[in-house]
Image (spheres, coloured by chain):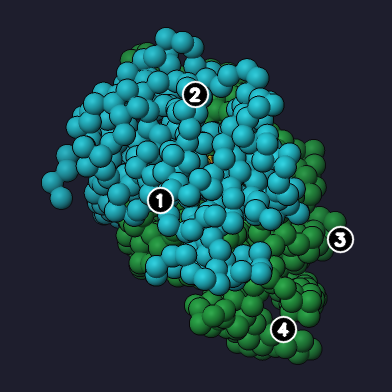
Amino acid sequence: MSPAVAPVPVPADATPTPPWTHHFKDYARFLIRSLIRATDGGWLFYGWMTLLTAIALVGANAWAVQVRDGMGVTALSDHVSWGLYIANFTFFVGVAAGAVMMVIPAYLYHDESMHDVVIVGELLAVAAISVCLFFVTVDLGRPDRFWHLLPGLGRFNFPFSMLTWDVIVLWGYLLINLHISGYLLYTRFLGLRPNPRWYVPFVFLSIVWAISIHTVTAFLYCGLGGRPFWNTALLAPRFLTSAFVSGPAFIILALQVIRRVSSFHVGDGPIRTLVNVMRITILINLLMVASEVFTEFYAGGSHTASARYLYFGLHGHNALVPWIWTSVAFTTIAAILLLRPRITEHLVLLDIACVLAFIGLWIEKGMGLIVPGFVPSTLHELVEYLPNRTEWMISAGIWAFGLMIYTLALKIALPIFTGEFTLQSSPPATRPVTGQDTAASR
Amino acid sequence: MDNPTTPSPAPANIPASAGVGRRTALKAVGATLGAAAFAKALAPLTEWAPNISVSEFLQKHYKQLGREELAAILARLEAETLERYGAEVHISDVPPQDDVQFAYALNLSICIGCRKCAEACHKENNHDRPSQQSYIRVLEMQKGSLDLEKGNAHYDHPVPQKDKFYMPVQCHQCDRPPCVSVCPVEATWKEKDGIVVVDYNWCIGCRYCEAACPYHARRFNWTTPSIPKEEVTPVQAYLSNRIRPQGVMEKCTFCLHRTRNGRLPACLEACPTGARVFGNLLDPDSEIRWVLENKRVFVLKEDVGTRPRFYYFFDE
Ligand code: SF4
Ligand code: SF4
């Protein structure tokens, strides 16, 4: 780009350079080597990434068509104006917030075994928030006007709009987690001890912030007086509880995959702690669902029409009934499985429980929460909604993209934590070491 | 298919050192293919982007526009309407007047549910023809009950039916409008004469306001509206009936391009029964004042606290 770069002489090793130049060079080296590492792997890795890329491509294409032809290519309508995208958005905010269930034991209770693997949760938060931001973006009718949402450039309806708040807290959470994991990885890469001053305050901030992202997301819905299904004070606590089920469920599965495919040591301690968290939160979640269902059905009246529609169908319309009962069944089975005292020794059962809980809550916090808010409409029209092909393709594309982010991030982070990948270590063997590289790293 | 997509070159992170391994070369090929595939996948965007001019992309919020800027925008919008719809239209900016507070009232005893108002709205406001969009929804209600759950907006039989009454619903121009408070970018606001408007060139299409409105008064442009050239209503205003772009929110504006110029809303003029009453609340001799003072009026869903400016009443 700038012609001035070329003539600048590369300082010889002998000339003393100010420390910040070192940092700059080290950091560049960190990024480049990370990129190389992130794209190196065995056939399993390449196969997995190719699969994800293919799915992401299908999603990207479907999104481009949606932008060109309008949101009319989805199954959404003026009656049900939010659907699968916002459902996914809501759920993944929960997954991001749920990652804090590793941070709390590690930093508040000084659980050493958790401390070693907490990075797995922090990176999950980064990937999940990216997924959320993608889902909001594909839901916009005018993505070209995204800049209207940027502070300073656009017009921010602050503090009245909960969506404005949500944008702030989501970006904030993303930045905090990027900072924490980026700082830890970089210092370890250099072979230094991370200085607590530079990250521990942010860790505590991230704990509070995790709660805030899901609370604000709940306020998005429960603040709407015209939608009785959402207009309940229990919504935010319910969001948090289910987040503390789905987040740990995903992490337990991820930790087991990591155990198999990498040399990163994952002890039983962290898994046991997460199972203990889930045991409680999944029961509290079921209790809250039950209490909400009781309130809706015992009193009756027309403001309970959405709940009736969701659970039993209304006037012959029952598109969501199979979804919600699947969710109820899955979460109940998962809760029972988790109650087994020695579940952590039966990994297959544990995995089944985690998968069931994850899917069950994806339905409950997604389709089972967003869609019934619109059915019946505020004028009591019954227009149903089920996502169509376009929406599934775009959503799958975003999931694939999120998994790509997570895979690559772990691919860089884990070897740093095992000490395989540092500034001192030579770059992957497949890449020949150039003279300059080794000279500079001394 | 044959879009001019330039596959971006392979990322520069692949070091081209002397001993490039086979794997590095493969990676470069993979990255190039990947980038090309993504460019291809996103190709539909290149057909969409030319529809958005640079000046539209950079356009400021309505309230931040100076006189000349606004004039230029109106001219651009007129030219675009001519180019895309073949229709010659005049788009103006009609500001609210002082000492005017608009309100609407509707006599449920004489409304016969003929949907003439909805049809007039459809035409006046240049709504999308295929979807038969309109800002007005007429509910057929069971006599003896105001329960919306017993209403039906999709009736398809001769009207009026003996045991029914009819309740048209449109934007209530609430004094505490939830749609305005939820909008993240202030694309919708309440004007000083009480009308709630949308800047169609600022709205990002998040549809939060549509979720927030308790009266189902907002409509989204799911596609680019299609209207035959000869059916386009040529007298248009920036904040009301100009043809809306794809992907933005729209709503009833009490026909501000008419009412702020001393005319009546199109729905009122179309009503064959005289069920509709519109006017300035601050004018003591207006018919709307007479109705509010002499009839027992009510508003819909008073309990949600929106304070509508749209009143219903029955003849005793
Ligand atoms: S009726 Fe709906 S759209 Fe109209 S002002 Fe009230 S909340 Fe907004
Ligand atoms: S759809 Fe447009 S007007 Fe409505 S809340 Fe979103 S940005 Fe505001």
* Total count of labels: 4
Answer left or right for B310 relative to A408: right
**Badge 4: how crowded within 10 Å, few (<14), some, or many (20+)?**
many
Pick out the residue farthest to the left: B2
The disc labelled 1 sits on which kind of residue?
Lys
Residue A438 at x, y = what percent? 47, 38
Q: Which chain is green?
A: A
Q: Are marks 4 and 2 on the same chain?
A: no
Residue A139 at x, y = what percent? 47, 51
Q: Which chain is cyan?
A: B
Q: Quadrant of residue A202?
A: top right
**Badge 3: how crowded within 10 Å, few (<14), some, or many (20+)?**
few
The alpha-carbon separation of the residues under discs 1 and 4 comes to 57 Å
The disc labelled 3 sits on which kind of residue?
Tyr
Q: Are marks 1 and 4 on the same chain?
A: no
Q: Which residue is mark 1?
A: B116
Number of the label disc, if any, that sits on residue B262: 2
Residue A155 at x, y = what percent? 58, 28
Question: Closest to the observer: A395 or B114?
Answer: B114
**Viewer can see residue B256:** yes
Q: Are marks 1 and 3 on the same chain?
A: no
Q: Which residue is mark 3?
A: A109
